[in-house]
Image (cartoon, helix red, strand yellow):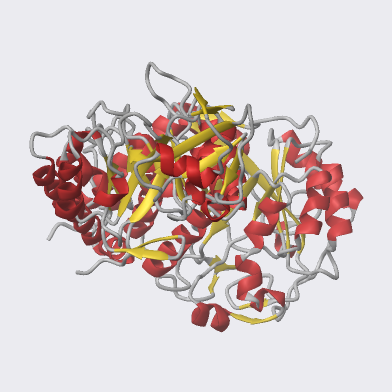
Amino acid sequence: MNIVINGKSQQLTSSKNLSDIVSAFCKQSKHVITELNGTIVPSDQWAQTNLQDGDALELVTFVGGG
Amino acid sequence: MMTFQQIKNILNDKSHKAVEELAQEAAQLTRQHFGRTISLYGPLYLSNFCSSHCTYCGFHSHNKIQRMKLEPEQYRKEMRFIHAQGIRNILMLTGESYKHTPVSYLKEAALIASEYFQGIALEVHPMETSEYKELFAAGVDGIAVYQETYDRARYAQVHLSGYKKNYDFRYATPYRAAEAGMRQISLGILLGLSNPSQDLFALYQHLRELEKSFPGVEYSVSFPRLRTVKSATLTSGDVDDVQFVKIIALTRLLFPRVGINLSTREEPKLRDHLLEIGITRMSAGSNTSVGGYTLLEEKYQDPQFDIKDERSVDEIVKLLKAKNFDPVFTDWRHIENSL
Amino acid sequence: MTDTPLVIAGKSFTSRFFLGTGKFKNKKDLADSITAGGSQIVTVALRRIDLERHEENILGFVPPHVTLLTNTSGARNAQEAVRIARLAKASGCGNWVKIEVINDSKYLLPDNHETIKATEILSAEGFVVLPYISPDLYAARALVKAGAATVMPLGSFIGSNQGLKTKEFIQVLINEIDLPIVVDAGIGAPSQAAEAMEMGADAVLVNTAVATAQNPAVLARAFALAVEAGRMAYLSGLPLQHSMAKASSPLTGFLYDDIPAN
């Protein structure tokens, strides 16, 4: 299925939950914040959140800033 | 904002150099913010019934004077007279009496006053916000309420009975008036009652807090000095002319846009000099007795305080113009009072 | 003479020097600067994770006792700022947010109006809101009403190092607003930070100057000292600076006319 992660289209081979996605795409899961289709998903719900074709996912974290 | 110690040091420094420097700076600031305008007003005493016993006042409840309260036809006469002198800002005063001069009486007076005057201010007993709202709707746009002294112990000593005894209610009055929409609020201390440095510091704090809470109000301050009444001195006044000048100059420095008022308690010569230094409002052609303009002969009059400057409005205007000041009778005209 | 702590939203701080974490050459410089400057509040931003590069997490370089202030930089309006703030909160790293709403790539001036709107929303949601604005008294009053925890007026344009171009307007806020005033943006030198503190500011926030210095940690320490010096000067009660009015004709001679010379 196809999902958009951080504005870029990604092909997923099989159905995944958010926990899998974060492990797959992020170096570490600490301080990763997820927003699925405009809604924030807290980390304790990642394992139960399954992705579907066409979902838009934002993975954000802290960076330096003024 | 100055500390108390700084104010004390300034007031205690008697050197001519110090007062001259202060005066020069105050004069410059006043010119910057007010140009050379002097706002003129006239007092009208409507009633001397008073329920408070304040030891320094000619109207106090225990003083044996002829108690009078003007009815509409009577104060109309007074108003016509004052109007004919050229005055367009009226300050209506009463003793402190909810009973004799309730809100309804004051409202009626305000409505009638608006036939003759553009600026209508009251110096009466402290009232509730709802009452100020009624008065505002009736055309009153200014309130004068002086704490007299901010020293609680001294306040209790000189306010022996009656509503005025309540320090806190009086202190909060300008807030209630501002809440009700009053556009001009005048604060003051009676110099000579208590330590001038302390009272000045407290007055400044009162004013600062008001400015923050109600920034849209036009504030002014007065520094009446304890005076004689029918030539009897009530309490020792010990703020001399040098200190007086300093108080006015310092106020101008710390509050560049606040009006500074000078009543006719002060001698003409001093008043004239103070024009350059920082005052921006003065009364003219004043009479401080109820019915004193048209209704009572002088020997029957009971003034609140003795007037030292007896010049008529015309004489004051002449003087101001001679000194290149711009006498202002009206600052604004009412269209409609609304919050 | 000891100072009282800076209290924001009930939390006490002994340092009045906030540090921004943007523009540093490397993370080690950042960590050293935070330590050297003794900052107890630092700003960070939120961005999409770069999935290709796998950058090191910046929070690993911020000591645990330091309060994180997430900047809503990137937001062009209140709604975007609110979204960023909520994302930051979801990280579990705290709910302190610096509202920075900028829809201006030429000057990077903040939108006071949108900032007020964002403050109302976020403060109602329990965030500790530190809004960044152009110094304007009405905006500051509205922010007080909206529930802001401080007001952060800019000294000059972000990154300009021009110091307190808005000095008189900041002074008005210090005089009239009863919230801590944190001067933010444009502070380019410790002397400027000291100047802000001498005026009565409650704290300063510096980023560009430190991050782009040759030796950031040393400059961070210099800033910390300057902030302390300025604060002490303010507490000591600096003498009033009179503009010496040019004497025209004497005004008070009349007071001494009658005094016999002796």
Give left or right: position of B170 versus B68. left
* Quadrant in the picture for residue C243: top left
Q: Closest to the observer: C124 or C46?
A: C46
Q: Residue B196's spot in the image, x, y percent? A: 40, 67
Most extreme residue toward the front is A13
Residue occupying image coordinates x 57% and y 37%: B39
Q: Quadrant of the C terminus of chain B?
A: top right
Q: Is residue B201 above or below residue C173?
A: below
Residue occupying image coordinates x 12% and y 61%: C262
Q: Is residue C147 above or below residue C152?
A: below
Q: Residue B109's spot in the image, x, y percent? A: 84, 50
Q: Closest to the observer: C52 or B328?
A: C52
Give left or right: position of B168 versus C37. right
Most extreme residue toward the top is C106
Give left or right: position of C66 versus B151. left
Q: Closest to the observer: B322 or B225?
A: B225
Looking at the image, can residue C174 be seen?
A: yes
Give left or right: position of C1 versus B323. left
* Quadrant in the picture for residue A39: top right
* Quadrant in the picture for residue C244: top left
Q: Quadrant of the N terminus of chain B?
A: bottom left
Q: Closest to the observer: C175 or B265?
A: C175
Q: Residue C253's spot in the image, x, y percent? A: 26, 45
Q: Is residue B9 above or below residue B74?
A: below
Count of numbered circles on the image: 0
Residue occupying image coordinates x 54% and y 42%: B281
Q: Residue B177's spot in the image, x, y percent? A: 69, 54
Residue occupying image coordinates x 75% and y 72%: B50
Looking at the image, can residue B317 be seen?
A: no
